[in-house]
Amino acid sequence: MAAAGSGHLGALLRFFYSLLFPGLTVCGVLCICLVIVLWIIRQHLQRKKKSVSTSKNEKDQMVVAFFHPYCNAGGGGERVLWCALRALQKRYPEAVYVVYTGDVNVSGQQILEGAFRRFNIRLVHPVQFVFLRKRYLVEDGRYPHFTLLGQSLGSILLGWEALMQCVPDVYIDSMGYAFTLPLFKYIGGCRVASYVHYPTISTDMLSVVKNQNTGFNNAAFITKNPLLSRAKLIYYYLFAFIYGLVGSCSDAVMVNSSWTLNHILSLWKVGHCTSIVYPPCDVQTFLDIPLHEKKMTSGQLLVSIGQFRPEKNHPLQIRAFAKLLGKKRAESFPSLKLILIGGCRNKDDEFRVNQLRSLSEELGVQEDVEFKINISFDELKNYLSEAAIGLHTMWNEHFGIGIVECMAAGTIILAHNSGGPKLDIVIPHEGHITGFLAESEEGYADAMAHILSLSAEKRLQIRKNARASVSRFSDQEFEVSFLSSVEKLFK
């Protein structure tokens, strides 16, 4: 045993000798230099952290930072951010709270006012904003090829900019930039957590490429070329491996649905610190809408809620709606109107809206389709109070706060038969139907026609079932689950 131990020690000494003396390899020198540089940077950041976290009373205050480059957007992810901040401020009021954001064209006060206007959320204590100038590094339009890799590497540089301005004690990535986790944990010396809305890469994406299926993340010219498909599959597998490594750095992982949980457990392999924390939905506000006060004309209104991003698949909604209008001419439906409600984050989103307008004109339904961009919470509530059907068409939607809001408001939901809607939301409540699922253009049109053909009594019963099922997605339930998941970071 001693001989074996001596052998291992000798091998270790020979290894260090090879690194430190003339026989030293270039790689060894570079590795040592890198370690020394990182150690120096870490020591500098630790001193910087100490000065930042000391209050005027000379007491150390914990600094809690959220990485959310698009915090002024109006999507479900932003609602999670503001509810999480509000929950932490209630539990740990003495801490300093920071949000890293790339919204440099607005002030911090305007961001907070926007959160109240869109989500009816007001924070109980001040929050500091660290404005990042390099958000363009994570824009998908910047990387026409190798988008996942480009955005992930860009997020590291953006994270570096954030870390150089403020070194927190607790770092929470609330937008899905997992590649920033090792940076803050090992260089910044932070305790780190993640709230994962949607995995950057999923096993479903791998199967799409493997089976050579065309999708928004797999162009037709690649699916038609076996060599390119093979190369892309290798790239995806390598990326998934690295994504798993960086994700496993998390001290606490929260996912928003059963679908996301399955993918994160498969890729990150940190089941011991991973839990489902359903996103907060302001269900009570929508539950306050009396079901019996729905107008008789509500059967004419269909609404869609979701940011204007490519994966939301708004073209499917317009095409299915056009098909429905075709059916209407053959049957006795009332006049119908489709309202697409969503947030626009940037010029790319605005361009997508213009494309959707063009599609409506091409299909001859432009008079029956309206777009409502970045509307207020009160406006959203008014539309849902009048709508008969809520549309959602994203394949493998991670959760779908808009779906829950529709159900709480008494709007019959028609969502995609996949992901969170299928596994967590549009599921039977006490054995009774709560909504409908579809997949294809024809399937959506048929489902909408079926819903509109139901009797008022049948529709009312479905709406009641849906309402009864959504209490598990309330703000209060989110606060309890979120605080329980991050509690260990504050000990």
Image (cartoon, grey):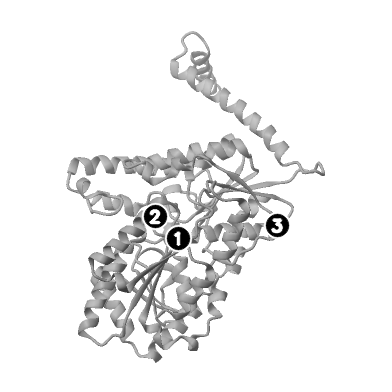
Find disc 3 in the rendering and name its residue. 125
Residue drawn at (71%, 55%) of the image:
92
Q: Amino acid at mark 1?
A: Gly
Crowding at mark 2 (Cα within 10 Å: few <14, some 14-19, many 20+): some
Q: Looking at the picture, tell me which residue is in the foreground, 54 or 429.
A: 54
Quadrant of image for the N terminus: top right
Looking at the image, tell me whether mark 2 or mark 3 is earlier in sequence order: 3
Residue drawn at (54%, 23%) of the image:
5
Discs 3/1, front: 1
Residues under numbered marks 1 and 2 in contact, where contact means CB atoms less than 8 Å apart: yes
Find disc 2 in the rendering and name its residue. 349
Q: Looking at the picture, tell me which residue is in the foreground, 61 or 285.
A: 285
Residue drawn at (28%, 61%) of the image:
358
Which numbered disc covers residue 444? none
Q: From mark 3 to mark 1, how far is it between C-alphas?
A: 26 Å
Q: Amino acid at mark 2?
A: Asp
Element type where label 2 sits in the image: helix
Looking at the image, tell me whether mark 1 or mark 2 is earlier in sequence order: 1
Looking at the image, tell me whether mark 3 or mark 1 is earlier in sequence order: 3
Element type where label 3 sits in the image: loop
Q: From mark 2 to mark 3, how far is it between C-alphas?
A: 32 Å
Which numbered disc covers residue 343? 1
